[in-house]
Amino acid sequence: MRKIMVTNDDGIGSDGLIRLVKAAKVFGEVYVVAPDGQRSAASHSITLHDEMIIYPYEYLIEGVKAFICSGTPADCVRVGSLNLMDRKPDVVLSGVNHGYNVATDIQYSATVGAAFEAAFQGYHAIALSEGMEPCHEVTDFYLQQLLEELMEKSLQYGQILNVNFPDCPLSACKGVLYDRTVSRGIPYQDHYVEKGKLPNGGIRLMVEGDISLESEEGSDYRAILENYVSVGVVNNIM
């Protein structure tokens, strides 16, 4: 039986994680190791100089062994596979993230960062994300089918599979596009807004982003913008 680890960067109680665990249970024994809260944009960071706190967690789904971790999603993969599971995972699934991980945003994504950590450890890794709208029809329709396909796909060292589901109604989805390249576009053009002044000349700033629709033909971002499910291999070989 496959050993499957599932993590995410939205926290152990997130809806996307719950839906992914339900889909993954069909394919093997599932362990959940996930952060105790929001860790978006933590990228591939790990905890080096502080202790991590890990507790068993009573998960909502019967038969799933779960742990809550004070560290990052990449930490979760490391401690899960090296300390918490009874043997190393055959597959690591990261997601389903609340918000697309396409184009240059991949560099910041802790969802993708956790998958990269799994790949570096030698595990088959799949990152999964969806849009921020509350419509999950496309994700829930294709999720199990794509897991079955992609868990069997051959990958080289340092490679992961990156899947993004559009948040349109299922009736508007045009299907699945494979072998999507990573767009060089920037989905959000960021700027910083001053939120207040502090003593001694300090200021408080908060980031805001304006959506950009620029993307290349054949890319992951173009697929999402045109209401396709995007599937592609992402390389992070050092």
Image (spheres, helix red, strand yellow):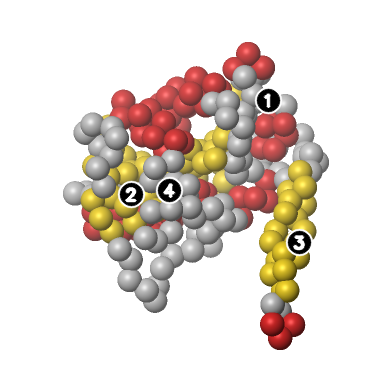
The image quadrant that residue 29 belongs to is: top left
Mark 1 residue type: Asn
Q: Earlier in the sequence, mark 1 or mark 4?
A: 4
Choose mark 3 or mark 1, whichever is in front: 3
Where is residue 229? Give x, y as percent. 60, 28
Which residue does the numbered mark 2 point to in the structure image? 33
Q: CA distance from mark 4 to mark 2?
A: 10 Å
Q: Residue at x 62, y 28 (%)?
A: 167
Which residue does the numbered mark 3 point to in the structure image? 193
Mark 3 residue type: Val
Choose mark 2 or mark 3, whichever is in front: 3
Q: Residue at x 28, y 32 (%)?
A: 61
| Side of 92 where 220 appears, left or right | right
Q: Circle 2: is it few (<14), some (14-19), or many (20+) Cα within 10 Å?
A: many
Choose mark 4 or mark 3, whichever is in front: 3
Dot 3: what SS?
Answer: strand
Which residue does the numbered mark 4 point to in the structure image? 11
Report the disc number at residue 55.
none
Dot 1: what SS?
Answer: loop
Choose mark 1 or mark 4, whichever is in front: 4
Dot 4: what SS?
Answer: loop
